[in-house]
Image: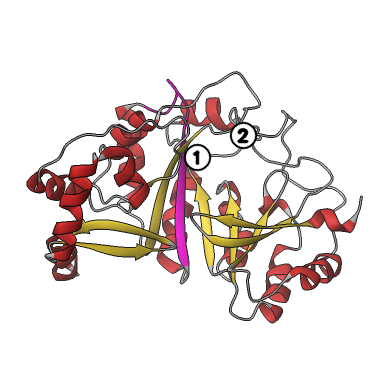
Amino acid sequence: MEKSNIIFGPIHSRRFGVSLGIDLSPSHKQCNFDCLYCELAPAATTNAQTQPLSVESIITELYKHLDEKVDVVTLTANGEPTLYPYLSELIDEINKIKNSTKTLILTNSATLTEPKVFDALLKLDQVKLSLDALSNDVFKKIDRPHEKIDVELIAKKVIEFSKVFKGELFIEILFVHTLNDTLQEVSKLNALLLQLKNLSRIDLGTIDRPPAYPVVGVSYGKLRELSLMFDSSLPINIASRTHAEPNNTSFTKEQIINTLDKRPLTHEDIELLFDEASQQRLKELCDDGKVMLKKSANLAFYLPTQNLKRKKDKN
């Protein structure tokens, strides 16, 4: 294995900025899930890495590629990065050299049940937790977890983590057609999300790349429909636009305000949903101070000014 495989990028991420990735399992897939939608080939699940990289080798490679143009150093893996046994030590060493660059991990949340991992993640600037389902049967169908992984315990630890984490917390939900795209499952996810503290953003996605198993994603329209099932106070973002076709719908100014009140939209969402006349009406609402842009973790959302005022008053 060449050490250069450890570092990849920088990659421009719409959600996180210029990202320099660290692959903590560059030689082969090592994961405690075998998700139906995974872009990697199917593989037997595991709860521990074999032949882990040394912290020194990772830091040596990172130092060669890290510069001021990088917004975030992203810990990921061919599998689950929190299975890396020296994660806490690695984060300590990255923090020594990263300067203003932020640190981020992309994890499936399952190992939050382990105190060592829980504490290690607290030292990061950004944490993205995946959470696809809370019903035990749906969870097992989609994520195909390693034995003895308990989704109810994961959910409890996600809540606990949100209350003590001081950085930016993201939740990602990936929808698979006919499995977790139901009102019942969204209701359970919604109830959990409402218990989280200091939540920066919730990204709703679907299958964008060829999956490991014969399953399919949902349309942008379905993602939009699902987004409206969540409580309007939640910072929902539709992260996936695969096969999204412009709706070119006409909205009056009142309808625009009502739409944004239910769910703030990004500029990309506006271009997909609004016709040109409606986009002009939105501009006029912004000029009149009735709609504003609010930045949230590298993304900007249009929302009614009164909406933001209500949230401030509530706080």
Which quadrant: the C terminus? Answer: bottom left
Q: Percent position (x, y) of residue 271?
A: 32, 44
Q: Is residue 53 above or below residue 230?
A: below
| Crowding at mark 2 (Cα within 10 Å: few <14, some 14-19, many 20+) | many
Left or right relative to 305: residue 216: right
Residue under the point 32% across and 54% down: 235
Position of residue 32 measured from the top left corner of the image (x, y, whole percent): 67, 40
Relative vertical location of residue 60 with respect to residue 248 in this rendering, above or below: below
189 displayed left or right of 177: left
Can residue 281 be seen by looking at this rendering? yes
Residues 78 and 138: in front is: 78
Q: For this rendering, which residue is in front, 182 or 83?
A: 182
Please identify the quarter of the rendering in which residue 249 is found. Answer: top left
The residue beneath circle 1 is: 151
- Residue found 92% across the figure and 50% down from its top: 1
Q: Amino acid at mark 1?
A: Val
Look at the numbered discs 2 and 1 and tell me whether their residues touch, using CB distance below 8 Å.
yes
Which kind of residue does numbered mark 2 sit on?
Pro
Q: Earlier in the sequence, mark 2 or mark 1?
A: 2
The image's colouring method is secondary structure
Q: Which mark is residue 145?
A: 2
Please say whether residue 281 is one of the residues in the magenta stretch.
Answer: no
Q: CA distance from mark 2 to mark 1?
A: 9 Å
Magenta residue span: 168-181
Location of residue 200 by image quarter: bottom left
Q: Which mark is residue 312?
A: none
